[in-house]
Amino acid sequence: METFDAFGKSSTGAQSLHPSDAVKMQEALKQIQMALAMESQMEIIKSINYKCFERCIYKPSSSALGNSERQCIAKCMDRFQDGLKVVNQTIMQRSRQEAEAMQNSAGLSR
């Protein structure tokens, strides 16, 4: 009995999906990835809002924020964003290193 993977490829290597179906699947995959990225961005924004509010707003009131509160929030958000940049750069660097290591090990095994 022939089995198929999630992308319609059979165990014998035959493609079961019509090319237009494969394109639709790729488009759906892109939409899912975009939705996940948006959700991630929303979580980051929620986290920044929560943390900076907790650090900078001591007495919530109905009046406008004072200068010190505005400066604190701006600095807090800048620090948070700088931290995210460092984390993202580190992740990208490690990913590149791992990809290079995999390529090198694949090249050595030939």
Image (spheres, rainbow, N blue to C red):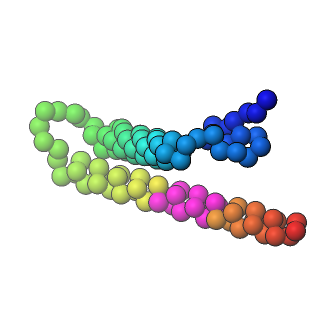
Indicate left or right for 78 with 91 as reference.
Answer: left
Q: Where are the magenta residues, as a range?
A: 85-95
Residue 76 position within the rendered picture, expressed as x and y whole percent measured from the top left: 35, 52
Indicate left or right for 77 with 109 as reference.
Answer: left
Please tell me whether the stretch drawn in magenta is mainly helix, strand or loop: helix
In reply to whether residue 11 is colored magenta, the answer given is: no
Residue 30 position within the rendered picture, expressed as x and y whole percent measured from the top left: 46, 47
Q: Is residue 36 visible?
A: no
Residue 42: quadrant of the picture: top left
Indicate whether 76 appears above or below 96: above
Residue pictured at 13% horizontal, 33% vertical = 62
Task: Tell which residue pokes out farthest to the right in this image.
Answer: 109
Residue pictured at 39% horizontal, 44% vertical = 38
- Nearest the camera: 110 or 3? 3
Residue pictured at 69% horizontal, 36% vertical = 4
Indicate whether 75 appears above or below 34: below
Quarter of the picture holding the N terminus = top right
Task: Tell which residue pokes out farthest to the top in this image.
Answer: 1
